[in-house]
Structures are given as C-alpha cells and as structure tokens.
Image (cartoon, coloured by chain):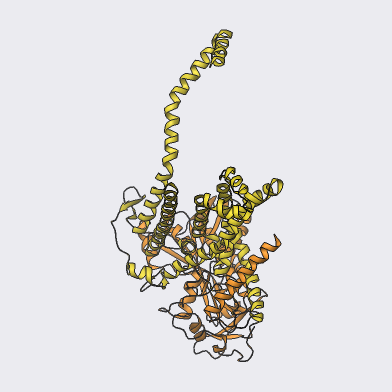
Chain colours: A yellow, B orange
Amino acid sequence: MTLQTSQSEIASGGSKSSGGLSQLLNRISDKLEPVIEWTIWFCGWSSIIFVAAIFLFVAIEAGGFFEQVLDEETNKLEYRWKGFEPIKGFTFKEFFTSINWRPDRYDKPEYGILALLVGTGAVTIGSMILAVPLGLGAAVFISEFCTGRVKETLKIVIELLAAIPSIVWGFIGVVVLGPLIVSATHQLSHIIPGFQPAFVGVNVLNASIILALMSVPVIVSVGEDSLKAVPDSYREAALSLGASRWEIVYRVLFPAAKNGLLAAVLLGVGRAIGETMAVLLCTGHAVNIPTKLTDPARTLTATIASELGEAVRGGDHYRILFFIGVVLFAITFVVNLVADLVVKGIKGQDNA
Amino acid sequence: MLRRSSSFLGILGCLGLFLGCGGGGTSSDDIVRVSRQNNSGTYAYFREAVLGKEGQFKLGSIDQSGSKDVVELVSITPQAIGYSGMGYATPEVKMLAVKAEGADAAVAPTSENAAAGAYPLARGLYIYLLGEPEGATKHYLNWIMSPEGQKIVEDIGYVPMPAVEVTDETAPPEATIKVAGSDTMVNAAQAWAEVYMKKYPQVSIQVSGGGSGVGIAKLIDGTVDLANASRDMKEEEREQAISKSAGKEIKEITTALDALAVYVHKENPLNEIDIEDLKQIYGDGGTIQKWSQVKGYPADDATN
C-alpha cells in the first residue's frame, strides 16, 4: 500500500500530463467495467443460449413448422408459418420398434430406427469396453508410474492422438484395420474350429477399435488430471502404512478420484456416441441388427450425415432426419443427467 | 509397451471368439451385398431397373457413400457383389455381363452395347435448369452436346449421345456459371468446365458435387444455374421448383448415358448374371443368400 502511494506521488510529481493520462485511463476503465462485466456474464450464459437455440432449431426443422414460399410482390423467398403437420405414415411405435429404415420408399415410407439405435449402442459399448481399461490404465501409468521425460513425451503423444481428424481415423479403419480384421479372423478360424471369420472388414469391431482409439486421449487427459488432483498426503499416508504401489492406486487413488474418473469415462462415451465420419466409414453402414462383432451395422449419426445432403429440404425424409437429431439430443441429455446424478450420489456418500 | 499391446490384441481375439461363435450364420458361400446410400441417383436407378417400380431393397446391405467406394470395397471382399458406374472399373474387380428378362444372352457392359440399347442397365445423365437457357449458359450447353463435348463423355467412360454440330460461331459473353449435383457426373462436369474455360476464358464455371438431390435442391433455391442429376427429378422436387421460381419451366437435357456395371471380386468364378437373380439377391423378400444359389455359379468351386 505504501509502495503504491509513493509510486503515484512520484508519478504525479514527475509530470502533470502523465497524471492526467492515468486519471483518463481510470475513467475509461470505470466506464468499461460494466461492459466487461456484461461480456463475462454473456460468456457464462452463452453456452445455455446456444444449446437452447440449437435444440429449438432442430425441433423446428423436425416439426416442419415453416415453409418456404415465394412472395409474389417482392419476388423473394420467405419463411411462413405453416403449423404442425404430422409426417405421413409416421408412428412413434414404428419409429422405435421397427428395423425397416426405408425413408425413400415412394408409396409407403418406413421410418424404423431400431437397427440404427442398436448400431449406435453396439459401437459405443464395444468402444468403451476397449477404451476404458486402456485409457484409465494409461492415465494411472502417466500419473503414478513414470516421471520426467517419459511422462512429458507420453502426454504430448497422447494429446497428438486427439488431434487426428476423424476422417483420417475412418480412412485408417477402412484401409488398414479392415483387411487386418479379415485376415486375422481367417487365421483364427483355421486354429479354432467353429469360429466364424469376418468377410467384410468394415463392421462393429472395426468401428469399436477406431472409436476406442479416438476416445482414449480424452479419457487419459481428464483421468490423469483427476489423479493428479489427489493430494500427495494420501499417497504418503498409504506408503507409511506399508501399501504397495498397486494398493495405492486401487485402494486409495481410485476411490479418491472417482468423480473425475467417471467424468473422463463419460466424456469418452459422449465422443463415441457423437462421432460421425469415422463410424460412417468403418461400420459398413448397413441397416442391420448386429448379432456378433464381425457384423456390419449403422449408427444414428452416420445416417444423418449420409442422407441429409440429398434429402428434399423440408420434405418428410428431411424432417425425419432432424427428428433423429432430437433423439440423439435426448440420448446425450440422459447420459449427462445420469452422470450428474451419479456424481452427486457419490458426493453425498462422501459427506455422510 | 509391447507386452501391453499384445495382451490388448489377445483380449480382442477372445471377444471376437465369443461373439463369433455366438452369432453363427456367415459362411464363405454367403453373398456380401454392397449398395449405395438411399438417396443416390445410382441407388434409385438400380432399384427401378432391377427391382421394378414397386421393388424395395433387402435391408442389411453395406451402403457406401460413393461410386468409387463400392468398387473399392468389392475389390477387397471376395464374396462381395456391388453395382456402380461402368467408368469405375479397376483391375481388382470383374464386371458381370447382364442378361435381361426374356433375353437370349447376357450382354457385357460396354459403350457399344449401351449405345445400341442392348445392355439392360443404362441410364441417362441429365442437366436440369429452370427456364430457357440464355447467353453463356446456352452456349455452354450447346457446346456440351457438340462433338467436342461428347468426345469428353466418351473419354471418361460414359456413352455419348448423338452429337449436334454447333452452327453459331459467336463467342459467349463474360459470365459465371455455377453447377452442382450428381457425384457420378462430377468427373465429366469438371472435364467439360476445364476444356470450355480454356477455350473461352471469359466464362468461369464452378463445379461442385454433393449428389443429384443436392444439385436439384440448390437449383430450386437459386444458388446454382445448372444441376447435374443421374436420376429423374422427383415429383416433390418439380412441385417445389415451380412454386419457388414463379412458374419457370423445368428443362431437362440428356447429356450422356451411363451403363451401371455389376461388380464382383476378380477371383469370383461367375461371369454373367440374370436380372432375375440380381433381384433375388438385392430385393426385399429375395431368396438368394449364397453364391451357390446363383445360376451359373460352379457348385463345388466355392471361393475361400
């Protein structure tokens, strides 16, 4: 405090003009303060505004509430309120329980997304079975078992993995992993009698492996952060009680960091559900309920990606694709909600 | 690191084993159907030509998003069958001769056969526009149908239309023509644009793909001047075009023919196929699941 006053005395004594300048700056910052405050407020709320706006947009497109018509006087295209009009032949029961996805059928379109839901589920679960142990294992290794240069190198390389675009992953899946799966399963079928080899390289297994590799970096970086956040005193206390390193990880760190680790896993799940380009290429994109890992499948996101570009704008097919978007929204919302509740539940136990 | 990756592969193998045994079903005789996504022009044409007006595809085919992708997947999958433009053939795949219903013999997918009308799977490649073409657009369209434009069609692997000699020798005015649409036609459209722009530098032609549906949607929205389409304009689209363009007439120009080839792996012993068998393979309710059920397929020589 004394230092500041002495400095300002020197400044004002030294030259009058600089004193005026600092006053001016003070005045400007006084004026700016509400603006900055408002900007920060907006940044905080913007995510909510954007989510609401996107949901509204998707829902409006799915509902077909507006139609584009030509204004005769101004000769310009205008949006006009049309009101809700149900899609011909659409029922919720068929939508969720039928595997027949034929939105292009001219006489009687069929809108069943059961196979697509199962495809999304199969690919997500498959990828998590691979990615969770691998990702959490890598996080534990980086956080607890290595130091110095090895640690830094691993962290950088894993972050690089996250920077590979999904179309590149998809390409690797089709060109490298596909033929590999075919030849590997054929080799296995010679060794193990009764084993069915894969005939197509693009299938649930391929997409699961690619998605797992894509979600591992997310799981590793979030998981490693949450392990790092566990105070060293926990580790020291455990060591002093004679715990081995594995016991520290398993009995001390995992329970202490479980919220963060759960968040890491759920971020991975989110990535897997939402991924589009890679699964479009790697699943085989077949409307089919997979009965084994080597069957091709199709996901909700890939269906939107491949069909939206060619659907007649505002038509029934277009609206159904947007409705699938609403369903995806609902799925991610439920996943996040469950995650929140689980995390809250764990916290509640801790407090009790 | 090595140990971890090998155990990772081991886990994968075990998982594959469990699920592989559980499912049952596929054998080396099974046909792997490769198809296109449900709004490609090729898909729509194949459905109409092979499965009939009311026909539907059997679900569960592997749907690729590009003509080239179909051929690529067939080339690495010995049991696969797929359909795609004739121009996409590679040495790794074999094109089957197709026998139409009631025909005496199967016809190979060649330009000559398609032009003569003998090959049953040939379709038109169209350019759509709204209203009468004017100025540079008219000049460009006339040029496409001239011997020079049709020569390009032939070079790319499509079947040319009877060429119309251009009598009007005046140069086109300065203009920008925007073209979008069919992925099947995009290579031809790009070649036309390149040669034409070299000849008439005052005209700039911007070509983009996206699919027949995208091209037509853009034409209706007024963002492009010409739409390439490898299928007919749908009734729904015609209505939209008329309501949004203040009653302009829809013009359709057939620029070339594309013979759709049926592709199989190069080691497949089959050389020709009946349309009826294709229908049983691809169609909803079709009975053919295995290669041994296909007419002309050697019974004891199954591919491994």
Q: Residue furthest top?
A: A13
Q: Is residue B209 visible?
A: yes
Indicate whether B21 appears above or below B155: below
Residue A267 position in % (x across, y down): 51, 54
- Which of the two residues, A150 or A315, is positioned nearer the viewer here? A150
Q: Residue furthest left?
A: A83
Q: Quadrant of the C terminus of chain B?
A: bottom right
Q: Report the side of B53 relative to B272 (left or right).
A: left
Residue A132 position in % (x across, y down): 56, 59
Residue A265 position in % (x across, y down): 52, 56
Indicate whether A75 appears above or below A272: above
Indicate whether A71 appears above or below B5: above
The residue at 43%/44% (across/down) is: A47
Indicate whether B283 appears above or below B184: below
Q: Is residue B158 visible?
A: no
The residue at 63%/63% (across/down) is: A172
- Which of the two residues, A129 or A33, is positioned nearer the viewer here? A129
- Which of the two residues, B135 or B111, is positioned nearer the viewer here? B111
Q: Quadrant of the N terminus of chain B?
A: bottom right
- How many marks are shown on the rendered structure? 0
- Which of the two residues, A155 or B248, is positioned nearer the viewer here? A155
Q: Residue furthest front?
A: A241
Residue A114 position in % (x across, y down): 42, 69
Q: Residue B257 occupies which quadrant of the picture?
A: bottom right
Q: Report the side of A142 relative to A44 (left or right).
A: right
The residue at 49%/64% (across/down) is: B212
